[in-house]
Amino acid sequence: PPEQFIDERHWDKFDLYSAGLIVVRVLFRPLWCGRYFDEFSENFHRAGYDLDRWMDTLIRSDASLGGGGKQRRWRLPLGLRRRFGEKIEPAERETRYVNLAAQSCSVEPPGEGDSKLTMCSIMEGLELLTHDGGGVCWTSLRGMLREHPKDRLDPRIVLEDLDEALLAAGVDVARRTGGAAVAEAALEVD
């Protein structure tokens, strides 16, 4: 996490940030490789721990989308457009991410010197994050990865969203949630 020391008032949100990084790494296959995860970490830090700004950076650098000085074949979903006052709803922005990834995949694969971390390479993860159901979605992930612990989502909200998605998929979560309730009650007593 960005903080070097755990703030005792928000200790649970320190772990939530770490869990968010694990989700990003699992969903975006190139990040399974340490080199590309380091590239992500560096760019995410430069983007102020803002996933949408990181996505803007990735889009701009994607050679198959005309990044690196070539003529662009897309409209920037968030960063530059925010400056001009155009408000884009999150669902629309997330759909644009998937569409840009599909466009990136329709062009030739990255060249020898190009990064393998492209919109096309993370398309599967983008599709999983962009859905109407509950679970780990863009909203959850944005909330998990905020820079300051006090601004991160409450872990219980993330778990409730995940439980909702699991129930919708027919998974019995009662046993797990019952054990969690006992653990939470024990924490409140201390």
Image: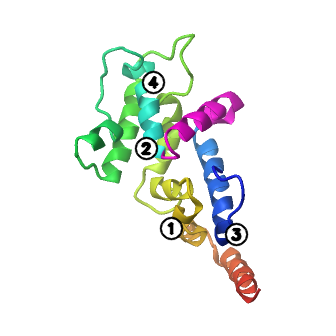
Which residue sits at x=47%, y=42%? 126
Q: Earlier in the sequence, mark 1 or mark 3?
A: 3
Q: CA distance from mark 4 to mark 3?
A: 39 Å
Q: Local crowd at mark 4 within 10 Å, few (<14), some, or many (≥20)?
A: some
Q: Secondary structure at mark 4?
A: helix
Q: Amino acid at mark 2?
A: Asp
User: Residue 141 in the image: x percent, y percent?
Assistant: 52, 54
Q: Local crowd at mark 2 within 10 Å, few (<14), some, or many (≥20)?
A: many
Q: Amino acid at mark 4?
A: Ser
Which mark identifies residue 61?
4
Q: Local crowd at mark 3 within 10 Å, few (<14), some, or many (≥20)?
A: few
Marks 2 and 3: in contact by CB < 8 Å? no
Mark nearer the viewer, 4 or 1: 4
Mark nearer the viewer, 4 or 3: 3
| Residue 115 versus residue 25 in the image, above or below | above
Q: CA distance from mark 1 to mark 3?
A: 35 Å
Q: CA distance from mark 2 to mark 1?
A: 28 Å
> Which residue bears the numbered disc 1?
168
Mark nearer the viewer, 2 or 1: 2
Q: Secondary structure at mark 3?
A: helix
Q: Earlier in the sequence, mark 4 or mark 1?
A: 4
- Residue 29 visible: no
Q: Amino acid at mark 1?
A: Ala
Q: CA distance from mark 4 to mark 1?
A: 38 Å
Q: Secondary structure at mark 2?
A: helix
User: Residue 88 in the image: x percent, y percent?
Assistant: 28, 49
Left or right: residue 77 versus residue 4 is left
**The magenta segment:** 29-50
> Which residue bears the numbered disc 3?
8
